[in-house]
């Protein structure tokens, strides 16, 4: 009887230890895969087109931005999103605004102070937000989210476009500040890279 109890206890301990080992390996695999993606796969397959897009955005980062303009806010103040943001067709948005002779400015690597200043700027008439986030806020650092309720008293905007994940519910910047909801864009779900690209394609065909 005692031997049977010992055997059962041994089996419980064995599976418990095995579960911990497997969990450890899973965690290690995830970390290694993430690093492998960030430092090898990402530069290998996306590095060249992103480099060209980044260079184009840098050279064409603003047009008549000292007056009423559209703010393209890139919430990419952390690695690797600092570079991956340019995987989106920001260059296509810029070409569209230039073709329409619309004033704009690209704001990159913004922090909390920057984003408040941009949104509160009375010359900012339209806003396009690109990055990671949720419906009620956008990620501006690895462990920092800027919540849109912090700028509810900012001047109203002609439109607001949230090109980031919009899950978890809550009020969006569109809800708070957009004058024209039809010209604005926000969802109630996670947006994929493909869905954001599709939106930019359709938006720039107007």
Image (cartoon, grey):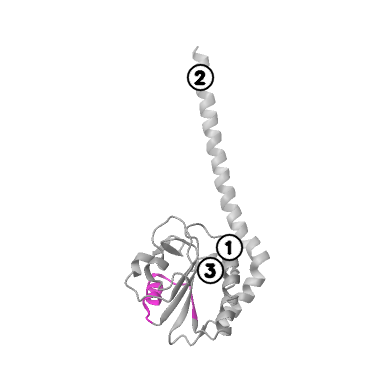
- Label 1: state its secondary structure: helix
Q: How many marks?
A: 3
Give me the C-alpha separation between circle 1 and circle 2.
57 Å
Residue 107 painted magenta: yes
Give me the C-alpha separation between circle 3 and circle 2.
56 Å
Q: Position of residue 185 (x, y in %)?
A: 48, 67
The residue singled out by tag 1 in the image is 195
Q: Residue at x 56, y 65 (%)?
A: 196
Q: Position of residue 50 (x, y in %)?
A: 62, 71
Q: Position of residue 22 (x, y in %)?
A: 57, 39
Q: Earlier in the sequence, mark 1 or mark 2?
A: 2
- Label 2: state its secondary structure: helix
- Foreground label between 1 and 2: 1
Q: Residue at x 61, y 71 (%)?
A: 201
* Relative to 138, 46 lies left or right: right
Quarter occupied by residue 202: bottom right
Tell me, for residue 82, which label it has, or none: 3
CB of mark 3 within 8 Å of CB of mark 1? Answer: no
The front one of 71 and 206 is 206
Q: Earlier in the sequence, mark 3 or mark 2?
A: 2
CB of mark 3 within 8 Å of CB of mark 2? Answer: no
Residue 141 painted magenta: no
Circle 2 Cα neighbour tier, 10 Å, few/some/many (<14 / 14–19 / ≥20): few
Q: Earlier in the sequence, mark 3 or mark 1?
A: 3
Circle 3 Cα neighbour tier, 10 Å, few/some/many (<14 / 14–19 / ≥20): some
- Label 3: state its secondary structure: helix
The residue singled out by tag 2 in the image is 6
The front one of 98 and 66 is 98
What span is in magenta?
A: 105-122
- Foreground label between 3 and 2: 3
CB of mark 1 within 8 Å of CB of mark 2? Answer: no
């Amino acid at each position: 009887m005692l031997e049977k109890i010992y055997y059962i206890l041994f089996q419980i301990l064995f599976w418990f230890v095995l579960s911990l080992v497997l969990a450890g390996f899973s965690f290690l695999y995830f970390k290694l895969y993430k690093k492998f993606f960030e430092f090898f796969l990402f530069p290998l397959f996306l590095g060249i087109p992103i480099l060209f897009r980044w260079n184009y955005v840098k050279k064409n980062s603003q047009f008549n931005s000292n007056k009423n303009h559209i703010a393209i806010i890139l919430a990419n103040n952390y690695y690797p999103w600092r570079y991956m943001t340019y995987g989106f067709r920001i260059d296509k948005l810029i070409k569209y605004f230039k073709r329409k002779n619309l004033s704009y400015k690209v704001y990159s690597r913004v922090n909390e102070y920057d984003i408040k200043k941009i949104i509160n700027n009375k010359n900012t008439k339209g806003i396009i937000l690109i990055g990671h986030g949720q419906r009620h806020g956008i990620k501006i650092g690895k462990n920092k989210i800027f919540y849109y309720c912090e700028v509810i008293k900012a001047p109203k905007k002609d439109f607001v476009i949230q090109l980031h994940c919009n899950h978890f519910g809550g009020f969006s910047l569109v809800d708070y500040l957009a004058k024209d909801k039809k010209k604005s864009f926000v969802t109630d779900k996670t947006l994929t890279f493909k869905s954001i690209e599709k939106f930019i394609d359709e938006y720039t065909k107007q």
